[in-house]
Image (tube, rainbow, N blue to C red):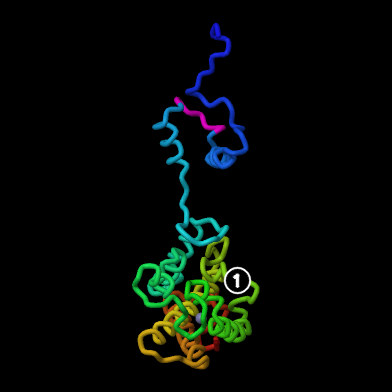
Amino acid sequence: MMGLCALDLTIPYSWDPLYVYRALRDFAFGAGLPRAELTSWSYKIVMAHLRSKQTMTLQRGNTALDPSIIWANVLDKCLNNKQKDIAWMSAHMCLPTRSFMFKRHLALTEHCPHGCTDTEHVYHLFWEFSVARRVWGLVLSSVSHNRLLPRSSLTAESVLYGPSGGCRTPELQRQWRIVNTVKQVLWEVRNIKVYQKTSADLVTLRRRTQNLLQDDVMVDFAKDKRLAREKWGVDHWKELII
Ligand SMILES: [Zn+2]
């Protein structure tokens, strides 16, 4: 009326809408829109602003960890290629477990191949499953003895995604390497069970993990003695009995 109540609807003037639009409000605040200094509020410019603020996200998985740290952990140079593959696929939740294959009509069942009635997904395979728990227990009893992997550092999240602060120190690299060696063994055993219908006993699992770790230690010492001493806490690879 007379220009007094005319509102310019091309500019947002309230960031506190009705409660039914709460989700939109949260999104706007999360994206920093109220503080954004845009030349115009046209669709194109707002979208360009949002795209510039976009951060890396995980497609699936429910973790509070920073995705950039997860991806850095997954591709950390302390892992070998096989372990990187398994870690990457676990973080993406696309490791070809029965649950993953069943959803895509590539497996007849989604149950765990080891005979338990649970669905076989990444958490089950590497953490929940009774064999996985026993293997973690066995490995911890031997590596904790050498103070290589503290019991407290092991959680479902750290097993799947790595240390929450990234692999900054040789200790954290060593721990992440050990965790991934165990994951590698669990995945191998699962594949042997699926494709060759053979179960491995715990002693074999433990030996396989020990052998892989011993090889790692030897390779590290052959590559860089100083770094390996810092990483494994011994002067010579023969001193470390895992
Ligand atoms: Zn199972």
Q: Residue at x 49, y 90 (%)?
A: 207
Residue beneath label 1, please?
155
Q: Nearer the viewer, residue 241 or 194?
A: 194
Q: Is mark 1 within 8 Å of ligand 1?
A: no
Residue with the most extreme left position: 106
Residue with the most extreme top position: 2
Q: Position of residue 35 (x, y in %)?
A: 56, 32
| Magenta region includes residue 37 | yes
Q: Say which quarter of the image contains residue 233.
A: bottom right
Q: How many marks?
A: 1
Would you say 186 lies left or right of 13 here?
A: left
Give the vertical position of 93 relative to 8 (above or below): below
The range drawn in magenta is: 34-40
Given the image, on which type of amino acid does mark 1 rest? Thr
Q: Residue at x 48, y 72 (%)?
A: 122
Q: Say which quarter of the image contains residue 102.
A: bottom left
| Magenta region includes residue 5 | no
- Would you say the magenta stretch is mainly helix, strand or loop? loop
Mark 1 falls on what kind of element?
A: loop
Give the vertical position of 8 relative to 101 (above or below): above
Q: Position of residue 121 (x, y in %)?
A: 48, 72
Q: Residue at x 47, y 85 (%)?
A: 114
The quarter in which the C terminus is drawn is: bottom right
Rate crowding at label 1 as few (under 14), some (14 to 19) or many (20 or more) other CA atoms within 10 Å.
few
Would you say 15 lies left or right of 46 here?
A: right
Q: Position of residue 216 (x, y in %)?
A: 45, 80
Q: Residue at x 53, y 27 (%)?
A: 12
Give the vertical position of 94 relative to 181 (above or below): above
The quarter in which the N terminus is drawn is: top right
Q: Position of residue 201 (x, y in %)?
A: 49, 93
